[in-house]
Image (cartoon, rainbow, N blue to C red):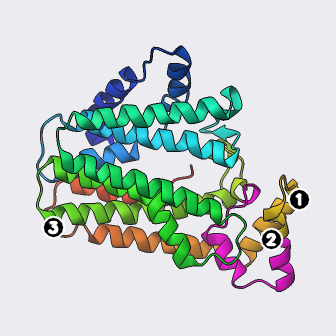
Amino acid sequence: MLLPIAGELKEVEEDFERRLGSRVPLVTEIAKHLVLSGGKRIRPALMILSARLCGYRGKGYIPLAGAIELIHTATLLHDDVVDNAEMRRGNPTANILWGNVASVLVGDFLLSRAFSMMVEAKDLRVLEVMAETTTLLAEGETFELTKTADLSLSEEEYLEMVAQKTASLMSASARIGAILAKASKEQEEALATFGLKLGIAFQLVDDCLDYIGKEEALGKKVGSDIKEGKVTLPLIWTLGRCSSEEKGFIRDTLLEVDPDLERIRGVVDLVHQYGGISYTFKRAQEFVAEAKLCLSSFPDRPEKSTLMELADYLLSRDS
């Protein structure tokens, strides 16, 4: 799918791998543990494709796309600490291997390194976008924390939270690609909205996979959201339709510090019973369709086709 920009993505990866070095060996070790463990590189791809779609043919995307990926990686390090996660991409998380303090500090290092890379663009607009985006990321994550095991969370509130904590970075990736290409304001907004809609769909598919995915594909245990007390869209839909007794069972399971497998399976069964998975996937399809419409004003070019294929891939992925 991303074969048309495989060369560009390789350049980006080689550049940000080189920048993971630190005078403190532990920083380099932890940073490389997650950055080099895989990942789809969707955000760098969004930036490159958006820039190319708007006619950009230079190499200025290299540090910027790498910076986006480092910011994404930093948020994963911080997320795993907040969630007490044990597995990420099929490997033990950094917080399990090196502890919470080291994980948080290396996440901070990656954020700092990312902004140093952003400065290379010598474009205040790029820095403005990323400063705003990192604020949204932090606010979204904090809001999610305040809603742990909160059965009153509405779909509207949840989607707004997803727009901040997940979709904002994808939106920024596409927007910066347009800025790099000096695209028109209309093109910039269209691509930013494309990234936002795509990011929301991405998270909704993630929500489904937590209930139906396979552990070996996900790289983490199925039911992790339940164990962490997270109320996601499949559960929100279910809570609006289940009995008060079933709602009590869900609440008690989410509030347990370490719910057993039987309780987790019980919640998963309820979500299936009330159609939470199918509803959430339907909403993801709707957001992908809305994202594609954002590209309608762009001429038919290979980059546009690849962005369309990327949108379809996000719906069909299993990890």
Query: Does residue 22 appear left or right of residue 214 in this picture?
Result: left
The x and y percentages for residue 282 are 52, 74
Residue under label 1: 262
Magenta-drawn stretch contains 30: no
Q: Do the residues labelled 2 and 3 touch (CB within 8 Å)?
A: no
SS assignment at label 2: helix
Q: Which of 67 and 109 is in front in this view?
A: 109
Q: Quadrant of residue 21?
A: top left
| CB atoms of marks 3 and 1 within 8 Å | no
| Residue 231 is inside the magenta segment | yes
Camera-nearest residue between 313 and 146: 146
The stretch of residues the image draws in magenta is 226-249
Name which quarter of the figure residue 220 lies in: top right
**Dot 1, how many residues are within 10 Å of its Cα: few (below 14), some (14-19), or many (20+)?**
few
Reading the chain from its start, which is encountered first: label 2 or label 1? 2
Which structural element holds mark 1?
Answer: helix
Residue at horizontal 51%, vertical 16%?
24
Can residue 292 be seen from the camera position used here? yes
Where is residue 98 shown, x and y percent of the image?
Answer: 67, 26
Q: What residue type is labelled 3?
A: Glu
Task: Name the residue beneath numbered marker 3.
Answer: 186
Alpha carbons under labels 2 and 3: distance apart: 45 Å
Of labels 3 and 1, earlier in sequence is 3
Residue under the image location 50 percent in, 20 percent down: 28
Indicate the position of residue 86 as horizontal and vertical percent values: 71, 39
Q: What residue type is labelled 1?
A: Glu
Determine which residue is flagged by label 2: 250
Q: Say whether disc 2 or disc 3 marks the residue closer to the N-terminus.
A: 3
Q: Residue 210 carries which label?
A: none
